[in-house]
């Protein structure tokens, strides 16, 4: 979490950095700061949003061609002005911005305090910059060498940028575990946590690798490893367009992203599925097709919404390809000494491609010889690069912190993967395979139709916006959708919500049901329809307030439910792509009506780069 951005070149640095920080605000938004180098090294920082920082800077002189900025998601120390970045060293001649966590900061701090260093914040980052200063002084070496040596001392994750008053034409950056991209312009360079602050100026970027140090000095870029071995930077051309990261007339990014789903699902299928030509091909898998054919187990690792997409994939791979699947929370998997075999296929799902636990789970599985497939949205992200192969979801940038279009894009890609593997393994009737291929192509139009329910859902949101609790129930393919609906509601509206398999309700949660409890039941026509109708009866018998998501034309459930939302019919394996849409809209409207900050909910950040 935290976003970093830096600039060195011929333009005014301050506006570029502030604009860049706004683009990165989804990564953290509890405080922000900026350092500008124009003779003096000046730091401006403030608790709150980037707009608070902007107001604070006001019309103070900010002329500089070199600078860096940071938007924070607090780890060490509460959000306040002094814990905000950048941090000066004790001499105030050098400063740092840092995304990540230094795990051994306490021990380093004690040593540095013993040597007279002063600390004005509670952060690990201030320890980092004083460590660099200490090495710089004691070894009488260049700042670049001091940074390099400091990297050998710190344990943890970092993407840093360091500026020094004594080297005004120089900017030093390094990464391990936290993302860092360099934009290469004409006699100018941009650094950022992702490419969104850069694309306005250049589409040529370099993704810095772990343990690399980049030094930009006198208009030249030099990248070396921590061991001082020079590397040749690989410049990539970005395809990202500016309008993809703007609100485009919507009130919130989340709403824009919900409404983008017909397009993003289509983009996830583009070139991979052409039903009438019998074409089903995921480029990233082709090379590993035999591994999938021979696989006797798939492990899926992910967090949050991506984990829910993984649960849908479990059902898909088991039903279509007959391969046993285990879906793991990456954070649990990596610490519980799991059994991982060389023959295992690990699918890592991540929108950002930067989630620290998912990345660590991949590293663990790799060390045991498993084959890793990444399903990521962000091109060039750490997880994409750490995977043996994979498939991008092509949902376009997701800026709203609550994941919406990334979820449906993940499910789309995983569905195509499962179908392709099933075809290769010969585990599916040809007719069903063809039917599902055709149905997949119809999904964007059905999602479009589901989005037309917006006004009705807004009305339901108004009825329930003040309740303290919600229950979400689903069975089969709709069970992960129930979990996802509950997660969406709690993260953006701060209403407590639980998702449950509908049948499991009898084993505890049913005790919660009374006349005040809204129960969202996803009860589309599928193989467990009769069963879920019985579950609805059980809720009704206890006077629960039923909001049912049903298939168009259902004439049974409307008599039992207080509200009914009808979605277009689809094969049950594909239904999550449609049934999740009203749940996204419901949580969005409830949150807006409660006055919550939908795009930047409290305590959250889009990219969780700490464990
Ligand atoms: C929920 C949400 C989070 C993420 C989770 C994993 O709306 O956005 O639960 O799904 O932090 O993030 P990625 O997919 O980037 O690994």
Image (cartoon, rainbow, N blue to C red):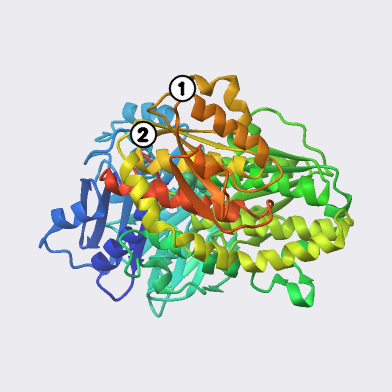
- The image quarter containing residue 439 is bottom right
Percent position of residue 63, x then y: 18, 68
Q: Which residue is mark 2?
A: 76
Taking depth in this image into account, of 68 and 165 the one nearest to the observer is 68
Q: Is mark 1 within 8 Å of ligand 1?
A: no
- The image quarter containing residue 129 is top left
**Alpha carbons under labels 1 and 2: distance apart:** 38 Å
Which secondary structure, mark 1? helix
Say which residue appears at 80% left-offset and 61% top-offset. 433
Side of 327 where 199 appears, left or right: left
Which secondary structure, mark 2? loop
Position above or below: 64 against 565: below
Badge 1, how many Cα within 10 Å: few under 14, some, many 20+? some
Percent position of residue 162, x then y: 36, 54
Taking depth in this image into account, of 202 and 280 the one nearest to the observer is 280
Percent position of residue 422, x then y: 82, 56
Say which residue appears at 49% left-offset and 66% top-offset. 222
Q: Which residue is mark 1?
A: 512
- The image quarter containing residue 127 is top left
């Amino acid at each position: 979490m935290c976003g970093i951005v830096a600039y060195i070149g011929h333009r005014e640095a301050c506006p570029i950095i502030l604009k860049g920080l706004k683009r990165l605000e989804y990564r953290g938004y509890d405080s922000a700061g900026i350092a500008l180098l124009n003779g003096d090294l000046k730091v401006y920082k403030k608790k709150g949003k980037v707009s608070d920082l902007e107001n604070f800077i006001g019309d103070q002189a900010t002329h500089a061609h070199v600078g860096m900025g940071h938007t924070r998601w607090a780890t060490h120390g509460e959000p306040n002005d002094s814990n905000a970045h950048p941090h000066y060293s004790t001499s105030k001649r050098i400063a740092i911005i840092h995304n990540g966590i230094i795990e051994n900061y306490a021990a380093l701090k004690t040593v540095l305090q013993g040597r007279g260093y002063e600390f004005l914040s509670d952060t690990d980052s201030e320890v980092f910059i004083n460590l660099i200063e200490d090495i710089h002084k004691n070894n009488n070496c260049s700042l670049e060498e001091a940074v390099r040596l400091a990297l050998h001392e710190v344990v943890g994750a970092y993407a840093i940028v360091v500026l020094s008053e004594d080297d005004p034409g120089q900017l030093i950056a390094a990464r391990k575990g936290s993302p860092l991209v360099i934009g290469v312009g004409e006699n100018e360079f941009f650094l950022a946590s992702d490419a969104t602050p850069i694309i306005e100026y250049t589409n040529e970027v370099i993704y810095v690798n772990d343990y690399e140090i980049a030094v930009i000095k006198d208009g030249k870029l030099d990248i070396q490893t921590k061991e001082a071995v020079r590397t040749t930077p690989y410049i990539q051309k970005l395809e990202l367009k500016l309008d993809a990261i703007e609100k485009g007339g919507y009130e919130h990014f989340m709403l824009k992203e919900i409404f983008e789903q017909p397009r993003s699902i289509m983009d996830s299928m583009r070139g991979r599925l052409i039903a009438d030509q019998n074409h089903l091909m995921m480029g990233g898998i082709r090379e590993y097709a035999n591994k999938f054919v021979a696989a006797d187990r798939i492990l899926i690792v992910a967090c949050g919404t991506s984990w829910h997409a993984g649960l849908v994939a479990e059902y898909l791979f088991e039903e279509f390809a007959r391969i046993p699947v285990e879906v793991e929370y990456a954070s649990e998997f990596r610490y519980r000494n799991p059994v991982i075999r060389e023959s295992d296929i690990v699918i890592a799902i991540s929108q950002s491609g930067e989630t620290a636990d998912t990345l660590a789970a991949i590293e663990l599985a790799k060390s045991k010889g498993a084959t890793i497939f990444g399903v990521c949205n962000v091109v060039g992200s750490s997880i994409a690069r750490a995977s043996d192969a994979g498939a991008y979801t092509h949902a376009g940038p997701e800026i709203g912190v609550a994941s919406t279009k990334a979820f449906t894009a993940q499910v789309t890609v995983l569905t195509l993967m499962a179908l392709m593997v099933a075809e290769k393994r010969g585990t599916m009737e040809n007719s069903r395979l063809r039917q599902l291929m055709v149905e997949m192509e119809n999904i964007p139009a059905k999602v479009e139709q589901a989005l037309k329910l917006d006004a009705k859902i807004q009305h339901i949101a108004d009825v329930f916006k003040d309740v303290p609790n919600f229950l979400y129930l689903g069975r089969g393919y709709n069970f992960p959708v129930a979990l996802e609906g509950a997660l969406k509601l709690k993260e953006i509206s701060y209403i407590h919500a639980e998702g449950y398999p509908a049948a499991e309700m009898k084993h505890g949660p049913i005790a919660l049901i009374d006349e005040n409890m809204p129960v969202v039941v996803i009860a589309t026509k599928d193989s467990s329809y009769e069963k879920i109708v019985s579950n609805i009866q059980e809720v009704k018998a206890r006077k629960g307030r039923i909001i049912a998501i049903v298939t168009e034309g259902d004439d049974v459930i409307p008599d039992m439910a207080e509200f009914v939302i009808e979605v277009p019919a689809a094969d049950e394996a594909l239904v999550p792509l449609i049934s999740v849409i009203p749940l996204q809209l419901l949580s969005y409207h409830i949150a807006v009506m409660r006055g919550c900050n939908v795009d930047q909910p409290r305590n959250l950040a889009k990219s969780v780069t700490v464990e």
